[in-house]
Image (spheres, grey):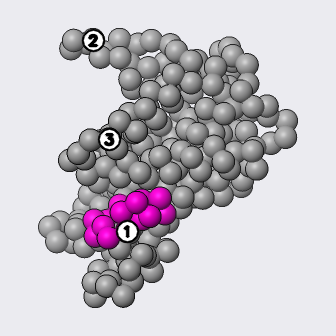
Amino acid sequence: MIPISDENPTKLTPYVTGALILACVGVYAWQFHLQGDAYGDFMLHYGFTPSTLMSPQFEATGIPAVPAIVSIFTAMFLHGGVLHLIGNMLYLWIFGNNIEDAMGHARFLVFYLLSGVAAALTMAFMDPSSVQPMVGASGAISGALGAYMLLYPRARVTVLVPLLIILYPFRINAVWVVGVWFAMQLLALTGPDTSGIAWWAHVGGFAAGIVLTPFFKSSTVPFFGPHIRRGPWNN
C-alpha cells in the first residue's frame, strides 16, 4: 500500500513539516551533485555509523567529520537515493502535518528529533559493531506514524494498492495503513536482510513516537480521535 493523502484537516500551517521536507530535499540536491568518492565520503562523514558511537576506540581515522552524537542528527537529512527521499517525504507530509497540528510547531520539532535519536540508538544497540552508515529520515518519521496511530487511528487515508499492473486507489482507516507498515517492519526482522534497510531504526522510532506522544500532544487533542470527515485544510 502506498499512502497518497489523508482526510484529516489541520488548523495550523505545517511550517516545521515543510521546513524539514525542504531541508531534506536541499541536502539531497547537494548529494546529487557529488561525484565518485566525494559522494561516498559525504555519506560516511555525515551518516550515523553505530560502531563510532558504541566503540569509539576503534573508530576509523578520518571517517566521521562530526562526533557520533552529532551524526545522529545530520543523518536524518541524508538519503540513499531519490526513491528513498520521495518515499520518506511523502510519509512525512501526509502524517507529519497532523502531528505538528496536534503538538504545535516547537514541540513537534523536538518530538521529531527525539524520535530520530531513539531510532538511531535502537539500531546502535541491536547492531553495535556495524560500520555501515545509516542515513534517512525514516526513524524520525516512524515516530510520527506512532503518534498518528494513537491520535487519529480512524482518519481515512487514500492508498494505492497494486493489482496486477494497475495501482487502484482505496480509502481505509489509518490504523490499517500504519498497522500494515509496522507489521512489514517486524516481518523484515525475522528473515535475512539483504536490502540495506535499518529495520530496527524504524521499530525504535515508532516505539519512541508512542511513548513520547502523551508528553508532547496538546491537552485539547484526545487519544484515538473520532473519524474525521473532509474539511477545507486537506492535504
| Position of 130 relative to 156 (above/below) | below
For the C terminus, the quadrant is top right
Residue 91: say if magenta: no
- Quadrant into which the N terminus falls: top left
**Secondary structure under the numbered disc 3 in the rendered image:** helix
User: Which region is colored magenta?
Assistant: 120-134
* Front residue (pair 17, 205): 205
Percent of width and height locating residue 39: 23, 66
Q: CA distance from mark 1 to mark 2?
A: 40 Å
Query: Real-space Cα distance between discs 2 and 3?
Result: 26 Å
Q: Residue at x 51, y 22 (%)?
A: 176
Residue 29 on image: x %, y %: 33, 56
Q: Earlier in the sequence, mark 3 or mark 1?
A: 1
* Residue bearing the label numbered 2: 163
Residue 125: image quadrant is: bottom left
Which disc is residue 190 wearing?
Answer: 3
Q: Which badge, 2 or 3, is on the more N-terminal residue?
A: 2
Residue tagged 1: 128
Instruction: Nearest to the eye among marks 1 and 2: give it.
Output: 1
Measuring 79% from the left and 31% from the top, which residue is drawn there?
Answer: 222
Q: Badge 2: how crowded within 10 Å, few (<14), some, or many (20+)?
A: few
At label 3, which amino acid type do we have? Thr
Q: Nearer the viewer, mark 3 or mark 1?
A: 3
- The crowding category of the residue bearing disc 1, from other C-alpha atoms within 10 Å (few below 14, some 14 to 19, many at least 20), is some
Q: Amino acid at mark 1?
A: Pro
